Amino acid sequence: MSLIWKLFFATAATFAVFLIVLATSPATVSDPIDPVELAELLGAFALLLVVQWWIVRGLLRPLGALQRRLDAVDSTRAHTHAPLAGTSEVRRLAASYNEMMARLDDERDRSTGRILQAQEEERRRLARELHDEIGQSLTLALMRIAGARDELGPAEPLVRAEEQVRTSLDEIRRMAARLRPGVLDELGLRPALTSLASELASHGGPRVERAFSDMGGLTADQELAVYRIAQEAVTNVARHADASVVTLTAGGDGRTFRLSVEDDGVGVDPDALASGGVGVAGMRERAQLVGGTLEIGPRAPSGTLVSLTLPLAGKESR
């Protein structure tokens, strides 16, 4: 039975009972009406309104719950299905809502995937240009300065120029490695995470403690997501945490893979988490795209914990 008919019959039944009670009760209405009689009629009418409100509220409660769920929709997050409860109209509306949210989730994942893929392609192109063009130009300049120094002697300007070019060449190589981790493509996730931790410690950052276990079963996309999330978390520690120790843990148990980056620094800014600052939005998008769950929060007694959990697909990692 449709909702409109349920409301109609509920209202008709309520008024019918009200009229029957009035017809069979000893109450009378005189002319002019007595104050007592007026009070009795108003009391009966108030009771009628309460009963009617209770019936309509019960019929419309599932619709109100669905409305609250719709009001709370966040287009950037995965959505839970609305329960198929209530009248047939409410159930159909909830089913339509679930279908719409499923399409929205799929489209968001496809869009995010295309964006991240384009970003990785651009990173790869920039890394190649930095390495092949700028890196080679700086190498040639370094060779010419070394040749001039051999001919003219160790003049101080030439020595300073050689040191500056060598420093710039090292920085270009580090930038290219951060843009596209060749060690991940060539050797796999474990060496890439090890290199990431070593790079942080070698540049005056906090001491890094590593605990790696089995890294099999991840797909290539999952490996890239794990590395990028670890890279962003470690970068945030170096820039914002003022930490002395960072613990990088990664490994799986055959069913799930877990990555955690925790530090003993000043802690995470709640406003940054709420606004998606310091790369939080990008990390969450990467985690969601590969079916993972990302949690970021305070670490006891101080610091921040970034935790990523991924389902394993059964494909052996390199």
Image: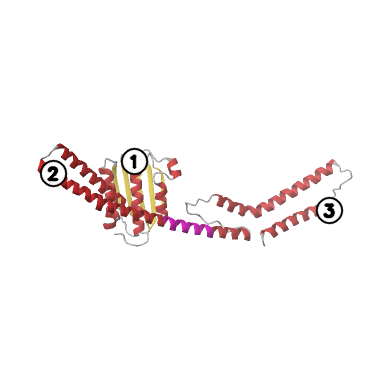
In percent of the image, x 38 and y 49: which residue is there?
A: 307
Q: To which residue does mark 3 refer?
A: 23
Secondary structure under badge 1?
helix
Q: CA distance from mark 1 to mark 3?
A: 82 Å
**Residue 59: x and y, percent?**
66, 55
Of 112 and 254, the residue lying toward us? 112
Mark 1 vs mark 2: in front: 2
Q: To which residue does mark 2 refer?
A: 148
Q: Is residue 264 visible?
A: no
Overall secondary structure of the magenta section: helix
Secondary structure under badge 3?
helix
**Residue 129: x and y, percent?**
28, 52
In percent of the image, x 27 and y 46: which residue is there?
A: 199
The residue type indicated by label 2 comes to: Ala
Q: To which residue does mark 1 refer?
A: 239
Question: Quick check: marks 1 and 3 in contact, CB under 8 Å?
Answer: no
Q: Quadrant of residue 225?
A: bottom left
Q: Mark 1 or mark 3, which has the lower sequence index?
A: 3
